[in-house]
Amino acid sequence: SLDNNGYMTYLYDGATLNEGSNYQNLYITSEVEVTLRTDIPCETLKVAGILNIAEGEYQIIGNLDVDYTSNTRLNISENGKLTVLGTAELGNGRICNSGILDVQDIKLTRSSSRFEQNSATAKLIVRGNFHAYSYDCCEITAGLVVFDGTEQQTVSNLKAYNIEVLNPNGIKYLRNIHVYGNYDLHGNPLDC
């Protein structure tokens, strides 16, 4: 198992994290599959392999960076919930959400970024801003996207099935949105 050992901690196949340890930066190496079993307090978790959230609720207390090749991915199962208290950023990688992903901000920074959600019970909760390089980066064909921030949020290049805006301050900036199911503002403002 791995304790906090300085600036960068590399996770290899079979590695486990010690509960209560504080990691500054964690790096899941290329072509390695890791299953999360504890919350991760860290400044940044960089995924260059495969990270599985099998079941249970976990937090990344910091930022999540999913970027290496198109085979790099984060898988959240139907019984899994991942909360990212910082920014979730995708470059050359994928997030496949069948459970719940609760993030502050989410950024899909390249045309090769992919956010996939095709389970009817899946939910993406965004408490800050959503930005994608293009709306083709999103394959949200089922489930729900919820905007539930404490300040006005911005949304650009989102293609989704159902969208709910629970933030009483509403959406400040909205660009290139495709909604296939329901778009419910719950009376909250749309200022664009």
Image (spheres, rainbow, N blue to C red):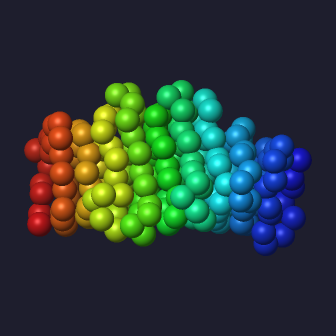
* Residue 138 left/right relative to 81: left
Q: Nearer the viewer, residue 12 or 106?
A: 12
- Judged from this view, the residue extending furthest toward the bottom is 7
**On the rendered structure, is 55 left or right of 27?**
left
| Residue 191, position as x, y percentages in the image | 12, 63
Q: Quadrant of residue 43?
A: bottom right
Quarter placement of the C terminus: bottom left
User: Residue 63 is drawn in which quadrant?
Assistant: bottom right
> In the picture shown, does residue 37 fall above or below 28?
above
Q: Is residue 131 above or below residue 74?
A: below
**Residue located at (60% from left, 65% from top):** 68
Q: Could you say where residue 31 lies in the image, as x and y percent from the top left?
A: 71, 54
Q: Is any atom of residue 11 visible in this view?
A: yes
Picture coordinates of residue 151 (x, y %)? 29, 61
In the rendered image, residue 105, in percent from the top left (x then y), is placed at 42, 60
Q: Specify whether residue 86 is in view.
A: no
**Residue at position x 89%, y 47% from top?**
1
From the viewer's perspective, is residue 105 above or below residue 180?
below
Quadrant housing residue 154: bottom left
Relative placement, left or right, of 157 versus 41 is left
